[in-house]
């Protein structure tokens, strides 16, 4: 084996190890963050079920006005119930930033 191929093999092995460690940290970090968020949200006593709420009830959620409430209802009638609260971001007008602000106020059952 030449010196070049030996060095290349060592670099490849090191890269593989670093990549695997980084992937494991990422997966662990993401799953931990999701469960932490879910625990905090499930304890919110005044959270509104977006699958059964009326237009008036949806408007009680901060940043949700008449139009957005109607869009939420239209979406669930057209596509069925929301499986996760995060699916609210499929609706025009609910960005990631807005969703993060209203997440504690919504629930899905």
Image: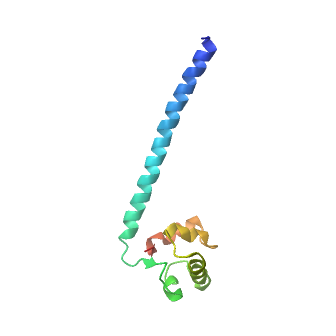
Where does the image place residue 18, in percent across and percent down from the top left?
Answer: 50, 33
Q: Using residue 44 as the reference point, say whether residue 91 is left or right of it.
A: right
Q: Looking at the figure, which quarter contains the C terminus?
A: bottom left
Where does the image place residue 20, in percent across and percent down from the top left?
Answer: 49, 37
Based on the displayed image, in which of its 4 quarters is residue 88 positioned? Answer: bottom right
Viewer-closest of 8 and 96:
8
Residue at 38 percent across and 65 percent down: it is 40
Based on the displayed image, in which of its 4 quarters is residue 49 positioned? Answer: bottom left
Q: Using residue 52 as the reference point, say whether residue 45 is left or right of it.
A: left
Based on the displayed image, in which of its 4 quarters is residue 68 positioned? Answer: bottom right
The coloring applied to the image is rainbow
Where does the image place residue 104, in percent across and percent down from the top left?
Answer: 44, 71
Where does the image place residue 5, in percent across and percent down from the top left?
Answer: 62, 16
Tell me if residue 60 comes above or below residue 16 in the rendering.
below
Q: Using residue 28 as the reference point, say whether residue 66 is left or right of it.
A: right
Tell me if residue 69 comes above or below residue 92 in the rendering.
below
Tell me if residue 33 comes above or below residue 67 in the rendering.
above
Residue at 57 percent across and 79 percent down: it is 72
**How many numbered tags mark residues here?**
0
Viewer-closest of 102 and 54:
54
Q: Looking at the figure, which quarter contains the N terminus?
A: top right
Residue at 40 percent across and 68 percent down: it is 41
Viewer-closest of 6 and 46:
6
């Amino acid at each position: 084996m030449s010196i070049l191929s030996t060095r290349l093999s060592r670099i490849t092995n090191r890269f593989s190890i670093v990549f695997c460690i980084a992937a494991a940290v990422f997966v662990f970090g993401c799953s931990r963050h999701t469960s932490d968020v879910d625990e905090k949200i499930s304890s919110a006593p005044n959270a509104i079920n977006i699958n059964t709420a009326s237009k008036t009830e949806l408007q009680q959620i901060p940043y949700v006005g008449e139009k957005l409430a109607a869009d939420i209802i239209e979406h669930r009638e057209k596509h069925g119930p929301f499986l996760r609260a995060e699916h609210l971001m499929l609706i025009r007008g609910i960005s990631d930033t807005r969703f993060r602000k209203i997440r504690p106020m919504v629930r899905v059952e």
